[in-house]
Amino acid sequence: MRLPKKTKVLVLFSSAVFLSLAGAYWFAHAADAIGARQAREMIQKMAGANLGPDQVQIKKISGGVGGGVIVEAQIETAFRFQKDKDGWRIADTRLGAGQWESFELIEEAIKKEKISRTNDLLQQIAVGIGAYKNERGQFVEAEDIATLLDLLAPRYLKTPRRFDLWGEELKYRGSPASYRLVSLGPDRKSGTKDDLVIENGELKTAEKK
């Protein structure tokens, strides 16, 4: 096991989810613009971290949407690598003095949150499809998600979203009598146990598919 040199990681905080120390974080601040000091202090403590003020450098603060701002920051930390049969991997990352966190646990927590949020997204779309069927007597007949959302929004679905939490486009195929709505899930591959599926309003689990 070797401890690499401190690594500076440029982190763009641009959405609602903290994606470990190499991802994105959205600061919603509807009142006055957030200051560099306040932003740095928030980053120092994010996700249970205890980073020192010298480890966080605010690079840029700019306006976002919906009353939020985007804070670009440079974080200095360290990663501990381990080698196994598949080669080198990141084992831990340092979140403060003497504070190491398992990178696998971070990734697993993010994966679970993305699955939960993507399932919520699929269910929101399914509610819109159900409302469409209740009014028109049939499911939306379409071969892709773009066509589906064009037919649902804004009457049946106020906030249409085409992409899941992994940035992949959702899949849809529907006839008047049935439909299938799919996210490719964490592995981003079609037809695997990671797929997140709603068929005719029912959320399918890996065991059911």
Image (tube, rainbow, N blue to C red):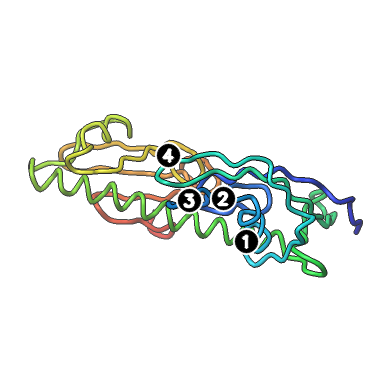
Marks 1/4 in contact by CB < 8 Å: the verdict is: no
Tell me the residue that label 2 is attached to.
25
Name which residue type carries label 1: Met
The earlier-in-sequence mark between 3 and 1 is 3
Residue 54 in the image: state x and y as whole percent: 79, 55
> Considering the numbered disc 1 on the image, is that residue within a helix, a strand or a loop?
helix
Tell me the residue that label 4 is attached to.
163
Name which residue type carries label 4: Phe
Tell me the residue that label 3 is attached to.
32
Q: Distance between the residues labelled 1 and 4?
A: 26 Å
Mark carried by residue 67: none
Q: Which residue is drawn at 81% across and 67% down?
A: 97
Tell me the residue that label 1 is attached to.
46
Q: Distance between the residues labelled 3 and 2?
A: 19 Å
How would you rate the neighbour count of disc 2 (Cα within 10 Å): few for under 14, some for 14-19, many for 20 or more? many
Marks 1/2 in contact by CB < 8 Å: the verdict is: yes
The earlier-in-sequence mark between 4 and 3 is 3
